[in-house]
Image (cartoon, coloured by chain):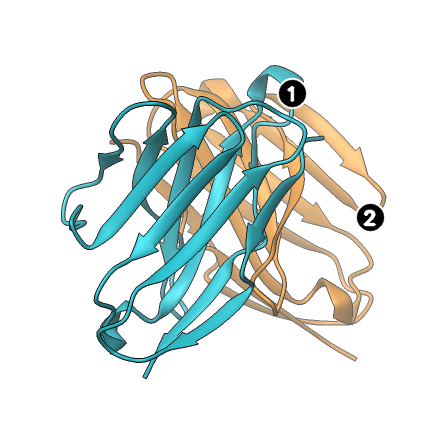
Chain colours: A orange, B cyan
Amino acid sequence: GIQVEQSPPDLILQEGANSTLRCNFSDSVNNLQWFHQNPWGQLINLFYIPSGTKQNGRLSATTVATERYSLLYISSSQTTDSGVYFCAVESQWGSRLTFGEGTQLTVNP
Amino acid sequence: GAVVSQHPSWVICKSGTSVKIECRSLDFQATTMFWYRQFPKQSLMLMATSNEGSKATYEQGVEKDKFLINHASLTLSTLTVTSAHPEDSSFYICSVPTGGQGYGYTFGSGTRLTVV
């Protein structure tokens, strides 16, 4: 099946800093989503982005499908941004989401 | 986007008992739903695919007789953990594919199961 690798596994920032999270995947995809898992476990859908660039407030994401990677940008980070960020993909061959291992983000005040 | 309701949010049960978790797609009809499990500090792993009106498809290593899945309607799938043991304690979360609406997959809020 498709492989999904996220980096870095852990990231510690001071409030106000910017960061970039990366997701590499091993095959062509029909779908790619970025999620933020809050402390209660709920998965918040940040972006549906199988290709191209999207922005939503302080967050933006870019997927370069031909090179099989996606980037999530967080600008002016806030303590409420803390949590785990997951990249999940659906390969062109299958109709299910496969998750990466996640990036644990800690934003300190 | 689609709304997926999952309950209970958390449940504590005794070893040997069974627990049922419900996943409802409130505004989107789904012939397929997915059940994931997440252990602490780990990623989400797909357990099974729930198919409306037919048998579920289980991932390798998942015991179908232990994790009973029923998808009786286009808006409801249930996961029953039978004869639960402490090692079944985990976070269970369902998802509904809503790609046709450009939102990909929508997830329920999850169920934290603790078996004592």
Please give the residue where the numbered disc 2 appears in the rendered image: A58
Which mark, residue A71?
none
Q: Amino acid at mark 1?
A: Gly
Dot 2 lies on which element? loop
The alpha-carbon separation of the residues under discs 2 and 1 comes to 22 Å
Q: Position of residue A98 (x, y in %)?
A: 38, 38
Left or right? Give the position of A27 relative to A6.
left
Q: Position of residue A31 (x, y in %)?
A: 50, 24
At 22% from the left edge and 74% from the top edge, which residue is drawn? B16
> How many neighbours does mark 1 have within 10 angstroms: few (below 14), some (14-19), or many (20 or more)?
few
Subunit ID for the residue under disc 1: B
Please give the residue where the numbered disc 1 appears in the rendered image: B102
**Which image quadrant: the N terminus of chain B?**
top right
Dot 1 lies on which element? loop
* Residue A99 visible to the viewer: no
Where residue B43 sits, quadrant-wise, is: bottom left
* Residue B75 visible to the viewer: yes
Near-viewer residue (A12 or B6): B6
